[in-house]
């Protein structure tokens, strides 16, 4: 699934300059606890989260996450956006809840991180 | 939908308050941030989280949530269980991730929110 | 400013002391590798650079100098104003001596009667030539224990710069950044690079100071480490593991301690990450290692940390992990990651 398709499914908007519409997303993970993200997430995943602090971008950098989608209309601070631009990590924001976002993506066929071996 | 139906269909393991599974569930709410749940979860939501410490019981009680599902095969702390027992709050565990569990709940028809069919 | 050196804090190039070579046997023993075919070319980059770059490429050109006639009282001002610990002494463009802070203190101890520098300076100055390979400076700095060498032009014998360990590593990192291309990472084989380095007994050490509660900069040390390991051509999976372990450890210091330090040593074959802090310590280390166990305050959890998975994560990423802590004093975490195998040797229990 491409980031562009994900954008449409979640009615999401890009934040910042990194707009890789064709970037391929293989799986997804929804969490607000960065240690769990670091532990479970695989590289090339989309991270859905309700946290919008710089540590989310740091976590994505360390774990090689392909993109971040903030849920419930969360908007990161300019410093966080800048950090993501530096690290070339695309950021999305959707007004949907975490539950709704995960549900829709799963319905459209995107697997979770623990399913895709 | 009754909590008991969800427990059965998604093979959740109930750790406490087995007798309270006839709670009505109107939607799922996924969050690991207590402040977020406090602010945004709604009465009758089934809370999906990684958190296992006793504070989750207090929050769920305050917001009148239908129950809590702890994911990624984590187990609630002992104190969490004893508090939930007092409050008659069902806590389930699942080895699924939040993403997958949401996907399956969604497929069972738990989508959108009470106030807004778009799920916003 | 060099962004790499900036983000990894203080950088050293250490030469491991196990080699008992006499002066210059280093270069005699170790010639520039002959295998220069296309595939081999990439993975010997670090080592090639040390041979191919000249001292003149890495030295600092702007050097503050004095003359034999400069007075010792004037020297006091020069050292103080420029915050330096010595200067080369130049006469008619030629290097005639060096005067250090030690010479200056000796002069103070002798009564500080003003006199020209030439009476107090060291005249037998060890210098290096600008056209020598960088590896000569690496080995000579190590053998002599000197902090710096004046660099002179081989023909004119004129002073052209000064070289320290800091300048060398800064130049190497910058050069690697220039030459760095994404696709090369996957072609590199870490073991090959370090096979070459092992022959030279060179290890890289990075040290970064961490300030407790500084959430704006939290993660910068680990970010710098990740970037550096990538440039060294280490396998992406190993880089990921090292970065995650280091980041979790860094966050622990930021969250729980007043201050701390991350020190990373990249040795041939393995990476050692050492994290020390002056935090409250962990009363029950065994309990702290249990998944989900946490003493974190609510505000920490709201930041997305403190859910009792940090140490578990570190263990999962490491080949070896050792945690020692004494309440009230602080915590010392030692992490070892093998560079030669991509899977951890020990799994989290």
Image (tube, rainbow, N blue to C red):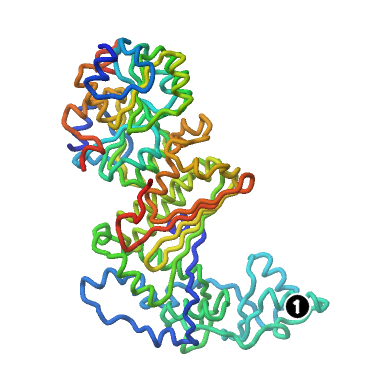
Which residue does the image show at 44% across and 42% down from the upper left? Answer: C310
Q: Position of residue A108 (x, y in %)?
A: 16, 29
Q: Report whether B118 appears left or right of C261.
A: left
Residue B103: quarter of image: top left
Q: Is C195 located above or below residue B84 in the figure? A: below
| Front position in the image: B31 or A55 | B31
Q: Chain of mark 1?
A: C
Q: Position of residue C270 (x, y in %)?
A: 39, 63
| Front position in the image: B100 or C143 | B100
Q: Position of residue C240 (x, y in %)?
A: 34, 51
Q: Where does the N terminus of chain B fall, quadrant-wise?
A: top left
Which residue does the image show at 27% across and 22% down from the upper left? Answer: A100
Q: Is B16 located above or below residue A80 in the figure? A: above
Q: Can residue C348 be seen in the rendering of this structure?
A: yes
Which residue does the image show at 24% across and 35% down from the upper left? Answer: A112
Instruction: Report the residue marked by disc 1.
Output: C106
| Front position in the image: B57 or C279 | B57
Q: Is C332 located above or below residue A59 in the figure? A: below
Q: Can residue A73 be seen in the rendering of this structure?
A: no
| Front position in the image: B52 or C116 | B52
């Amino acid at each position: 699934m491409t980031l562009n398709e994900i954008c449409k499914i979640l009615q999401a908007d890009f934040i910042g300059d990194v707009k890789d519409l064709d970037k391929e997303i293989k799986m997804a993970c929804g969490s607000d606890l960065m240690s769990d993200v670091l532990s479970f997430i695989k590289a090339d995943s989309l991270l859905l989260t309700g946290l919008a602090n710089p540590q989310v971008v740091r976590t994505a950098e360390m774990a090689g996450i392909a993109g971040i989608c903030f849920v419930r209309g969360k908007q990161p601070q300019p410093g966080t956006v800048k950090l993501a631009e530096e690290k070339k990590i695309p950021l999305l924001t959707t007004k949907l809840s975490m539950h709704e976002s995960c549900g829709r993506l799963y319905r459209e066929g995107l697997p979770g991180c623990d399913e895709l071996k | 939908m009754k909590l008991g139906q969800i427990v059965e269909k998604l093979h959740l393991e109930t750790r406490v308050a087995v007798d309270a599974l006839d709670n009505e569930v109107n939607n799922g709410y996924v969050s690991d941030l207590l402040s977020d749940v406090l602010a945004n979860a709604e009465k009758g939501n089934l809370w999906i989280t990684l958190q296992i410490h006793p504070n989750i019981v207090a929050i769920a009680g305050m917001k009148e949530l239908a129950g809590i599902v702890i994911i990624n095969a984590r187990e609630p702390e002992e104190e969490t269980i004893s508090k939930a027992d007092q409050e008659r709050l069902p806590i389930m565990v699942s080895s699924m991730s939040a993403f997958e569990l949401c996907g399956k709940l969604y497929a069972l028809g738990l989508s959108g929110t009470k106030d807004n069919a778009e799920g916003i | 400013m060099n962004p790499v050196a900036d983000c990894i804090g203080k950088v050293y190039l250490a030469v491991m002391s196990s080699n008992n070579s006499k002066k210059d046997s280093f270069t005699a023993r170790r010639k520039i590798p002959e295998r220069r075919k296309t595939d081999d070319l990439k993975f010997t980059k670090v080592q090639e650079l040390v041979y191919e770059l000249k001292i003149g490429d890495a030295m600092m050109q702007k050097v503050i100098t004095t003359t034999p006639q400069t007075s010792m009282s004037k020297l006091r001002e020069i050292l103080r104003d420029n915050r330096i610990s010595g200067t080369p002494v130049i006469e008619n463009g030629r290097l005639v001596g060096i005067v250090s802070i030690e010479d200056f203190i000796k002069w103070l101890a002798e009564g500080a009667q003003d006199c020209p520098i030439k009476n107090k300076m060291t005249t037998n100055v060890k210098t290096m030539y600008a056209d020598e390979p960088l590896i000569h400076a690496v080995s000579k700095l190590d053998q002599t224990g000197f902090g710096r060498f004046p660099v002179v032009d081989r023909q004119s014998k004129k002073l052209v710069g000064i070289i320290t360990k800091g300048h060398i590593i800064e130049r190497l990192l910058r050069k690697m950044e220039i030459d760095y291309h994404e696709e090369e990472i996957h072609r590199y084989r870490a073991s090959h690079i370090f096979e070459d380095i092992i022959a030279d007994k060179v290890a890289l050490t990075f040290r970064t100071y961490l300030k407790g509660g500084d959430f704006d900069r939290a993660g910068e040390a680990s970010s710098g480490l990740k970037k550096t390991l990538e440039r060294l051509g280490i396998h992406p999976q190993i880089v990921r593991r090292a970065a995650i372990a280091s980041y979790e450890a860094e966050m622990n210091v930021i969250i729980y301690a007043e201050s701390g330090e991350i020190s990373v040593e990249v040795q041939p074959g393995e990476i050692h990450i050492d994290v020390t802090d002056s935090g409250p310590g962990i009363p029950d280390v065994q309990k702290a290692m249990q998944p989900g166990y946490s003493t974190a305050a609510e505000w920490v959890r709201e930041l997305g940390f403190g859910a009792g998975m940090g140490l578990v994560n570190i263990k999962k990423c490491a080949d070896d992990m050792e945690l020692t802590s004494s309440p009230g004093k602080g915590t010392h975490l030692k992490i070892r990651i093998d560079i030669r195998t991509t899977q951890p040797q020990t799994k989290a229990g």
